[in-house]
Image: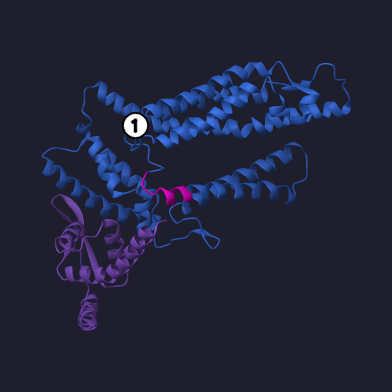
């Protein structure tokens, strides 16, 4: 493996690590209003946070298992869709996470 | 959308059973939404080729399912031997093979009136575990090294996936070696009899299936050559392999059950109890070992599997004969 490739792989791993935490925040922020998976993914992409369904749906399931989201199957446009929104616990934790993120962001900006 | 259904079924097979229906329902909705949007932008339905390109972008069903699995069990010894995508299939095969092995050992011991002891199972069971683990480790290595192609496409999707040239070439080399070995056998019996060729020779009954087997090997080679030249002739693989394996079943049956002797003493060799035992051993080894029941069963099972894989090609052929366009099914 060439050093270029190694550096690229390393960067990719670090980038994914950095993105993972932010994605949770972005998903929770988007789910303050109810959405189903496909529109949520599009909304995230439109805001510069593209996410493939193979990452998004397992993440939604995990957040739901943790009690941060609630979901409901409903028919829309002649198709059954699963709508997600933040639960009451989710709303509380989202506020805390957002405050944490803002504080980290301001610290980082100071360091940088 | 039979291709979509087939893709979803392939993903579902790799999902944990308790959540599979729920996940598939959601994935189905997402994929349908994407397809609808892209078809609307095109102003027409996807062709089979475009649909396949869409699923290829989406990913191998096994990899897609892996992302949903919480139980990322794998087999590793400091480094990964069998990854989480293949591990459930490995367990399934291991269970099946071990059941078959244990049942076979019991049947054989009963038939030859030997008491059933634990010791009789040790070697066959260990051999199964080692062989299967090695095979799956190699498959895992290939998946890690070349993560893009679909190695195990479901039958409905297989017609749309060109056969990769390296796959055909590897088969060509392997079957070429088998053909050379088989052609050389009558001239160099040592290739199957080893040092025993000094006192043994192949019996005349050998010729009953020598040519049919050679023809089957040559048919296998021609299939690889055809796909090497025309990777998009995907129907060649299941159809020819189904025919080859189906033809091999009666030939191997005759070999195992209807051919009393495959090896006899060479001309001029005096019959002694030792040589008679040698003849018996070699006949048993060839009939029950080298070309024995395992090959017969393999051919039978392969014929069924390839017949299954031929069905979508047949459907496509019928659709084409009726003048339906590939996209009409959507």
Within the magenta stretch, is there residue B40? no
Locate residue B52: give its quadrant: top left
Of B32 and B172, nearer the camera is B172
Of A30 and A70, nearer the camera is A30
Residue B110 pos. (x, y %): 73, 40
Check disc 1: other Cα within 10 Å, few if <14, some if 14-19, many if 20+.
some
B111 is higher (above) or lower (below) than B193: below
Name the residue rendered at 85%, 20% in the picture. B269
Residue B326 pos. (x, y %): 23, 31
Local SS, label 1: helix
Residue beneath disc 1: B312
Tell which chain the image draws in blue.
B
Query: What is the quadrant of the N terminus of chain B in the image?
Result: top left
Name the residue rendered at 88%, 20% in the picture. B270
Of B119 and B181, nearer the camera is B181
Query: What is the quadrant of the C terminus of chain B in the image?
Result: top left
Colour assigned to chain A in the rendering is purple
Highlighted magenta segment, given as a residue range: B140-149
Residue B299 pos. (x, y %): 54, 30
A31 is higher (above) or lower (below) than B272: below
Name the residue rendered at 49%, 59% in the picture. B74
Residue B79 pos. (x, y %): 52, 60
Within the magenta stretch, is there residue B144? yes
B57 is higher (above) or lower (below) than B232: below
Q: Is residue B316 left or right of residue B163?
A: left
How has the structure been colored for display?
by chain
Chain to which the residue tagged by mark 1 belongs: B
Locate residue A39: give its quadrant: bottom left
Of B96 and B168, nearer the camera is B168
Q: Is the magenta stretch mostly helix, strand or loop?
A: helix
Q: In this view, does A23 lie to the left or right of B130?
A: left
């Amino acid at each position: 493996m060439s050093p270029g490739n190694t550096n690229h792989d390393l960067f990719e791993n670090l980038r994914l690590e950095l993105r993972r935490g932010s994605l949770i925040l972005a998903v929770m922020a988007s789910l303050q209003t109810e959405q189903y998976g496909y529109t949520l993914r599009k909304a995230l992409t439109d805001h510069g946070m593209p996410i493939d369904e193979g990452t998004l749906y397992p993440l939604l399931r995990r957040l739901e298992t943790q009690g941060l989201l609630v979901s409901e199957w409903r028919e829309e446009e002649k198709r059954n869709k699963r709508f997600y929104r933040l639960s009451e616990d989710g709303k509380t934790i989202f506020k805390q996470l957002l405050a944490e993120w803002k504080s980290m962001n301001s610290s980082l900006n100071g360091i940088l | 959308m039979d291709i979509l259904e087939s893709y979803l079924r392939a993903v579902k097979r790799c999902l944990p059973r308790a959540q599979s229906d729920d996940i598939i329902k959601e994935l189905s909705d997402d994929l349908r939404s994407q397809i609808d949007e892209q078809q609307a932008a095109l102003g027409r339905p996807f062709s089979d080729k475009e649909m396949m390109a869409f699923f290829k972008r989406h990913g191998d069903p096994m990899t897609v399912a892996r992302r949903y699995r919480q139980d990322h069990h794998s087999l590793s010894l400091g480094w990964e031997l069998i990854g989480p995508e293949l591990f459930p299939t490995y367990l399934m095969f291991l269970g099946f093979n071990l059941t078959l092995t244990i049942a076979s050992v019991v049947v054989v011991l009963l038939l030859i009136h030997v008491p059933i002891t634990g010791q009789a199972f040790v070697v066959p069971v260990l051999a199964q575990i080692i062989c299967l683990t090695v095979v799956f480790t190699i498959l895992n290595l290939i998946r890690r090294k070349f993560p893009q192609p679909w190695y195990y496409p479901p039958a409905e999707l297989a017609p749309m996936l060109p056969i990769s040239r390296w796959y055909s070439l590897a088969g060509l080399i392997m079957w070429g070696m088998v053909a050379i070995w088989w052609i050389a056998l009558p001239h160099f019996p040592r290739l199957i009899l080893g040092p025993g060729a000094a006192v043994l020779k192949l019996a005349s009954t050998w010729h009953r299936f020598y040519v049919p087997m050679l023809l089957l090997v040559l048919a296998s080679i021609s299939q690889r050559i055809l796909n090497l030249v025309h990777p998009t002739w995907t129907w060649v693989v299941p159809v020819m392999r189904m025919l080859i394996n189906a033809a091999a079943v009666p030939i191997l049956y005759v070999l195992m059950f209807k051919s009393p002797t495959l090896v006899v003493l060479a001309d001029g060799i005096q019959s002694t109890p030792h040589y008679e035992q040698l003849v018996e051993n070699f006949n048993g080894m060839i009939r029950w070992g080298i070309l024995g029941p395992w090959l017969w069963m393999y051919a039978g099972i392969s014929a069924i599997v390839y017949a299954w894989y031929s069905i979508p090609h047949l459907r496509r052929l019928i659709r084409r004969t009726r003048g339906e366009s590939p996209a009409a099914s959507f």
